[in-house]
Image (cartoon, rainbow, N blue to C red):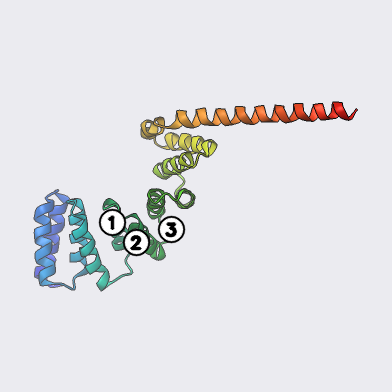
Amino acid sequence: MTGNSNEKLQEALKLLDAGLIERAIEVLRELVEEKPDLIEGWYNLGYALTEAGQYEEAVKAYDEALSIDNFIFEIWFNKGAALYEMKNFEAARECYEEALEINPDDAEAWNNIGNCHSRLADGEAAIEAYTRAVALKPDYAEAFYNKANAHFIEEDDERAIAYAELAMQLDPGLSKLVGQWINVAKNRLASKREDAEYRKKRLEKSGSKESDYSD
């Protein structure tokens, strides 16, 4: 990297740190125009564009970075995040999977894959991904909440309640989100248990009558 390129990159990073996103984008665009093979320029441009909510342009910048080196975890991860914001959940999932090929032990990537599966209405795959996330990071409150919510959607209320309570223990700030559905889960679970008990008694009663007839 030439001295001028390094100066521009450092200027852009300082602007990003200061929250001056639009100015940082201008500097980074100038930088990649001058040095189109500079991966740091494209990567940081993608990041800045994402911060500005320009997700489609961010994806293009990340693609330029990946064309230079496609074995960098952060580029795949951030591209996935931009695609997720665009509601392109399938493509986002694929990016997170690419990221995990590089670092399979990243809990946040597993959590985000779970979110993609959840948006794609694949509850079983979502739960599997969240389970991987919390196995890697046992204090990951957000992933425990997401896992609880996925179980709730699948109507596995016992697990939904258990993981929701654990999530709230780890992060009491999640109580408001949990409160939106936990009573539904508790009522549904109580109803299922009552129904199961009723059926059990009916079967026992039926068995008793058959025994009486056999006498």
Left or right of residue 50: residue 103: right
Disc 2 marks a residue whose amino acid type is: Cys
Q: List x then y, in percent, for residue 176.
A: 36, 31
Element carrying mark 2: helix
Mark 3 or 2 closer to N-term?
2
For disc 1, the neighbor class at 10 Å (few under 14, some 14 to 19, many from 20) is many
Mark 1 or 2 closer to N-term?
1
Residue bearing mark 2: 95
Question: Could you say which quadrant of the image residue 170 lies in?
Answer: top left
Residue in the image at 45% along x and 31% along y: 182
What is the number of the mark on residue 68? none
Q: Are marks 1 and 3 in contact (CB under 8 Å)?
A: no
Q: List x then y, in percent, for residue 206.
A: 76, 29
Residue bearing mark 3: 105
For disc 2, the neighbor class at 10 Å (few under 14, some 14 to 19, many from 20) is many
Q: Nearer the viewer, residue 163 or 15?
A: 163
